[in-house]
Image (cartoon, rainbow, N blue to C red):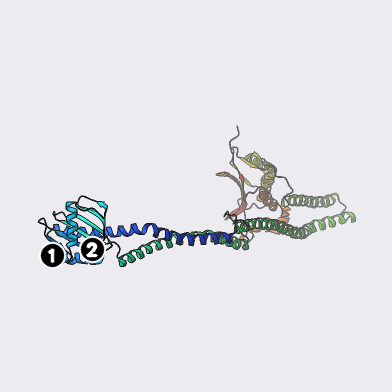
Amino acid sequence: MKHSIKRQMAAIFIGVIAGTFLCCALINAFFLKDYYMADKKKAIVSAYEVLNSGVSSGKYEDNTFKTRLEGICNTDNISIFVMDNSGEPKLATNRDYQMLQKKLYSYIFETDARDTVVLDTTDKYVIRESQDRMLQADYLEIVGTLDSGEPFIMQTAIESIRDSAAISNRFFLYIAAAAIGVSSLLIWWLSRRISEPILELTDISRRMTELDFNAKFTSKSDNEIGVLGEHINQLSENLERTISELKTANNELQKDIEQKTQIDEMRKEFLSNVSHELKTPIALIQGYAEGLKECINDDPESRDFYCEVIMDEAGKMNTMVKNLLSLNQLEFGNDVVTMERFDIAALIRNVLNSSRILMEQKGIHLIFKETEPVYVWADEFKIEEVVTNYISNAINHCEFDKVIEVKLQQEEELVRVSVFNTGQPIPEADLDKVWIKFYKVDKARTREYGGSGIGLSIVKAIMDSLHRECGVRNYENGVEFWFELDARAMENAN
């Protein structure tokens, strides 16, 4: 490939190594002399400062000063000569100071400027480079006047083999250390740049094994890693799409299996319950019909009684079949729910008016105090069926004080409708079972008023289709059934 990672790495590391040595060689060739002279100038200026401080303060005869000055001279190979104002030697670090004295006279009287190059000048001294032709040696000199007024000269050999080697080695050590540091940083950066995409691919592959396909390769490069990353991204997308399709198909299959199982269970339960519920009325109809056929009682009153029993039992079977069909449509979602806004208080009053005669016959005292409209959103026809079931259930189970109380309670965006009747509380073990089809708490009494055990199942199915809650609560003197409806956009009628 044009941008092969192997070629890139080879070229980069070879270039880094070659560049490092080349830079060291160039720096050593071009800057070693300057560094060497700067080091010598620094040493001789430092010696001057010590000398100036000691002589100006009058401590030049002090042993501590002499020891310090002697140490500097020995370390940096510096010769010092100071002359007093009368021209006599005041301080000299070596015995052969005549040459230094002669150079100092030449500087004072400016008689001999040959073989000298001025490097730096201040108010107090001049730094210069001089050559001794007889000895074929170069020197770095600082000559001038101390703060106390005495002229001085300080001299150090420039080309001392030992000093040159030490300085050269030290200088090269600094450059080499710097070069190694820069090279290390560059190589570290390059290694990180190369390894990060590989680590990213490793992490992506790990997450893919855990079926996490959200991770994508984001590094952009034109080498083999970039191509591999693009292929990994494509593989991830294809796997995610394929697994999504498989999960969708599996979910649909699971739903079909569960639905089929549920349908089979409901069919078995339906056949069992219907057979049980129809057995008694069919037996009664058959028995009374046989009695009529055999003319067991010839008087008109007996025949009328037999016919009424047959008609009553047939009517009960007809009602049960209609309720079963209605419940079946609700449970399978085949019944259309029409959401509309209506006055629930008016609907309850209509149901209560329809049941008022039956309540009066049983001596039931009705309490319903709501007179203002209360608007809700629901299927009005289905809610009427719920209220009718609750009222009918309350009438059939009303005992003791024989009181039925219907209440409307507004709770934020909901309206709760409750129907309470005095009587025997439902056993706690049966509270959650009253919504099951054909379940009867008191079978003898249910049979007495013609109940089939489907009414509350229809209530539960209707409330589930509306996605609202319903429930039952026991009191010491009775039972309360309730349901809730959506009251958003609720307002009074104009």
Residue at the left extreme of this rendering: 86
Compared across the picture, whether 416 is left or right of 246 comes to left
Compared across the picture, whether 195 is left or right of 394 comes to left
Of residues 229 and 233, the one nearer the viewer is: 229
Q: Is residue 296 above or below residue 417?
A: below
Asked if labels 1 and 2 touch by Cβ distance under 8 angstroms, the answer is: no
Residue at the top extreme of this rendering: 494
> Which structural element holds mark 2?
strand
Q: Residue at x 73, y 52 (%)?
A: 332
Q: Quadrant of residue 179?
A: bottom left
User: Residue 378 placed where, x, y %?
Assistant: 65, 43
The kind of residue on which mark 1 rests is: Asp
Q: Quadrant of residue 383?
A: top right
Disc 2/disc 1 C-alpha distance (Å): 20 Å
Q: Count every numbered label the image shows and give the total.
A: 2
Residue under label 2, please give it: 78
Residue 361 can be seen, yes or no: no
User: Residue 240 placed where, x, y %?
Assistant: 66, 57
Q: Main secondary structure of the magenta part?
A: loop
The kind of residue on which mark 2 rests is: Ile
User: Residue 339 placed where, x, y %?
Assistant: 67, 42
Q: Earlier in the sequence, mark 2 or mark 1?
A: 1
Circle 1 crowding by C-alpha within 10 Å: few under 14, some 14–19, many from 20: few
User: Residue 468 placed where, x, y %?
Assistant: 63, 49
Q: Is residue 337 magenta?
A: yes
Residue 69 can be seen, yes or no: yes
Q: Is residue 283 magenta?
A: no
Residue span colored magenta: 332-338
Circle 2 crowding by C-alpha within 10 Å: few under 14, some 14–19, many from 20: many
Which quadrant of the figure contains the N terminus?
A: bottom right
Q: Residue at x 28, y 62 (%)?
A: 136
Residue under label 1, please give it: 62
